[in-house]
Amino acid sequence: MVRIGVLMSALTFATVVLANPPAPAPANDLDKVQGYWKPLQCETEGKAMMPTEIMKQVTAVFDKSEYFLYFKDSKLDKDGKPIIFRLALANITLDAATAPKAITFEFADGPQKGKKCHGIYELAGNQLKMCYGPVDKPKPTKFESPAGSNYFLETWARQAK
């Protein structure tokens, strides 16, 4: 009789637990930035960094904690395939606890390998705004890139793959 009582208690507990699984954890900002992004605005020191036509050829990809920046050339290779250059590879760290939120890029290869860019970011729906300084300089405190600051101000739109 005791065994039946224990078995019934265990079955009741299992039914309650399985019927009411815990709610999934809310997505953090690293989860939210995953995917492909195209630039809407890129400026440094208050001036456009590149023409709109060139911006169309740039793609940023966030894959887990890695950041890739690609440029798709308008020319094709000998096999008729697009030529794609990787401009940057960095590991990113996001700190949503600061105001404004902080982002750090640590370059994983190339001449800047091991160096860091510190910046701030803001996620609003399918747009990502970032403002960051040159390598190994303090992060900006506002989303501005005034003359003489050496800051970069960028707005990106989420894209399908």
Image (cartoon, rainbow, N blue to C red):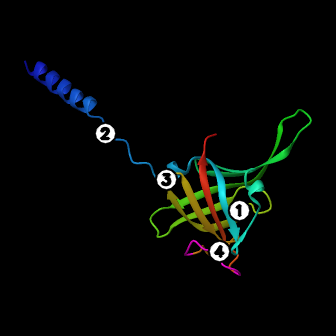
Query: Disc 4 on helix, strand or loop?
Result: loop
Sequence-first disc among 2 and 4: 2
Q: Earlier in the sequence, mark 2 or mark 3?
A: 2
Q: Which residue is mark 1?
A: 114
Q: Which residue is identified by label 3?
A: 125
Q: Residue type at mark 2? A: Pro
> Is residue 60 one of those drawn in magenta?
no
- The residue sitting at the front extreme is 52
In the current view of this chain or complex, which residue is farthest to the right? 78
The residue that mark 4 highlights is 145
Structural distance between the alpha carbons of marks 4 and 1:
25 Å
Q: Which residues are magenta?
A: 141-148
Q: Nearer the viewer, residue 48 or 59?
A: 48
> Residue 96, how many percent across, how many down?
47, 62
Identify the residue at horizontal 38%, vertical 46% (top origin): 25
Residue in the image at 46% along x and 52% along y: 28
Mark 1, Cα crowd under 10 Å, few <14 / some 14-19 / many 20+, is few
Q: Is residue 127 above or below residue 151?
A: above
